[in-house]
Amino acid sequence: MAGRRLKLRYPATCAVCSSELPPGTEAWWSPDAKQASCLVCHEEPAPAGARSEPTAGRSAQREHDKREDARQARVKDRFPRMGPLLLRVAGEPQSSKAWASGAAGERLVGERLQALAEEGVITLHDRRRHGTRANIDHIAIAPSGIYVVDAKHYQGRIERREVGGWLRTDERLYVAGRDRTGLVEGVIEQTAVVRAALGEEHRSVPIWSILCFVNPNVGMFTRPFVVRGVGVTWPRALQKEVAAPGPAAAETVATIAEVLDRALRPA
């Protein structure tokens, strides 16, 4: 979108991603179209006929930028003279940093998966889950099947624990000593969305749920493991797993990718 970069005086909505842009947010304004676009979405148009593929981590980065712009606008509005100094001294809050960290993790995993294009793998990034604000980080369609990948940038030791008793099994995922089994349940929900989007024609295609930790604290001899049917791994091991040969022909991979691309729009 052509125009000029400025700080909005009034609330607006990004014409590209529909995210809210509060007053004080830096954005691009098109006087001709009378529309605003956020800094993340303001790009040069792609060449004619080129396929537009969302960048990995784009929605997380957009959320970070939106929160940080709004915070800076609030501080500068309340303290016109001291605002810039207060922002430098206080630094960025952890709640905003977490979004930036998550976006960086998604980009790293996305690069690993994109590198498998020569192996016949097609990867879709940052796909919207209908009816929610959540997204699916990566969907890798490979000759061996479909991999629904949720990238996580957490610190601390990653381990599987069995906390059940004699009469029941209760596998849980722990990160830095904290129960993070909710992450497992989250990627299972994402996989259900992908499976539903496939339709009856491709229901026989195997789908794997994957949690990929960008910077895991694991031992030298630790291997990827499974918790409640979800693979827990890291970028290098994930890349090797997705690149494994499989029975699906290139035409089948491309067809499935088109089906999911149409059903799950960019976040």
Image (tube, helix red, strand yellow):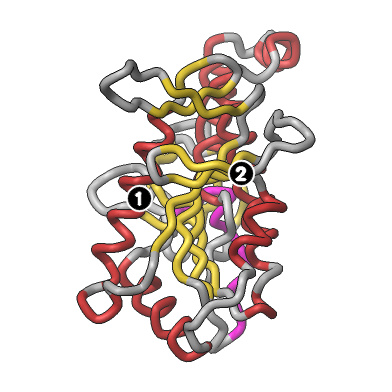
User: Residue 122, percent across and down?
Assistant: 55, 74
The structure residue drawn at horizontal position 68% and vertical position 61%, both measured from the top left corner, is 240
The structure residue drawn at horizontal position 48% and vertical position 28%, both measured from the top left corner, is 173
Compared with 134, 4 (above or below) is below
User: Residue 34, percent across and down?
Assistant: 41, 58
**Residue 91 is inside the magenta segment:** no
Q: Is residue 83 left or right of residue 183?
A: right
Q: Kindly give the residue lying farthest to the left in the view shown.
A: 200
Relative to the observer, which residue lies in front, 14 or 91? 91
The residue wearing badge 1 is 190
Q: Which mark is residue 224?
A: 2
- In front: mark 2 or mark 1? 2
Residue type for callout 1: Gln
The structure residue drawn at horizontal position 60% and vertical position 80%, both measured from the top left corner, is 120
Q: Is residue 219 left or right of residue 2?
A: right
Residue range in magenta is: 35-47
Q: Specify the principal SS of the magenta part.
A: loop
Is there any visible trace of residue 61 in the rendered image? no
Q: Compare marks 2 and 1 and give the one earlier in the sequence.
A: 1
Compared with 74, 10 (above or below) is below
Relative to the observer, which residue lies in front, 71 or 180? 180
Classify mark 2: residues with Cα within 10 Å, few (<14), some (14-19) or many (20+): few
The structure residue drawn at horizontal position 49% and vertical position 49%, both measured from the top left corner, is 210
Q: Secondary structure at mark 1?
A: helix
**Residue 36 is inside the magenta segment:** yes
